Amino acid sequence: MKTALIVFPGSNRDRDMIGAITQISSNAPILVWHKETSLPKVDVIIIPGGFSYGDYLRSGAIAARSPIMGAVKKAANDGVKVLGVCNGFQILTEAGLLPGVLMRNKSLHFVCKNVKLEISNADTDFTSGYKDKQIINCPVAHHDGNFFANEKTLAEIEANNQVAFRYANDTNPNGSLNDIAGVFNKQKNVLGMMPHPENLIEKANGGTDGRALFETLLGVKS
């Protein structure tokens, strides 16, 4: 599978993501600068974490209006798989590719720690390497990860089985509604998540709980 990774000014988790994709698939992703207006033909698009545009105005709001996002939206509408992690999640919500918004953490502090995640939907191209209700470890590092949606939208997300991951075992680090740590679009080909699975793909870094997501997404057999 071919992968494109979108880079914005302020991205700082792009190298981690490049390393994870390269190690797992043996192919480095194609790097696409945010000012481009078109994408190469790829199977997967990834928007990494960081602080795009310094989080000015609102996290992900300026990046969501970058030229490349028009091409990302078109690709997503055509069925290409899109993964946004942390700031990438924020960008996808601001771009209207995912429901809800990411607000300031309930504590009003930046949070960097390991949390527990429960797999809420293991029947997707992102999560089928896990089992439903499986609990995994995953690190978080964010200031604006508090997922919020109005009552109607939240009910639709739950009814459509769009929750990918929930914070488990009382480890919700930001106050997200319904402990939501990651959500899909209705078609399940776009996933946004606040935790960083790219940082748990090898034992040398503390564990491999994030590896199955990438193996599934990239079509790699473990």
Image (cartoon, rainbow, N blue to C red):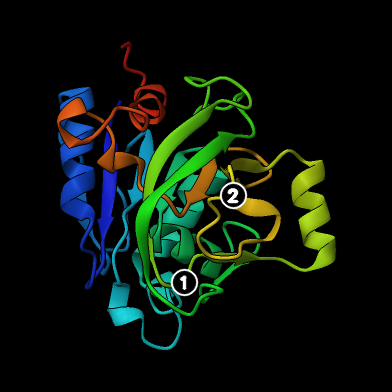
In the rendered structure, the answer to whether residue 5 lies left or right of residue 157 reads: left
Q: Is residue 113 shown left or right of residue 173? A: left
Which part of the image, by quadrant, shows the C terminus?
top left
Q: What is the distance, in whole Å, between disc 1 and disc 2 at their CAs? A: 19 Å
User: Taking 150 as reference, is 189 above or below it?
Assistant: above
Q: Position of residue 183 (x, y in %)?
A: 59, 48
In-image side of 164 versus 10 (left or right): right
Kindly tell me whether residue 95 is visible in this rendering.
yes
Residue 170 is labelled as: 2
- Of circles 1 and 2, the one toward us is 2
Residue at image coords 49%, 65%? 145
Residue 60 image offset from top left, x and y in percent = 42, 72
Callout 1 crowding tier (Cα within 10 Å): few <14, some 14–19, many ≥20: many
As helix, strand or loop, the secondary structure at mark 2 comes to loop
Mark 1 residue type: Asp
Residue at image coords 41%, 72%: 143
Q: Amino acid at mark 2?
A: Asp
**Mark toward the start of the polypeptide (1 vs 2):** 1
Vertically, is 57 above or below 136? below
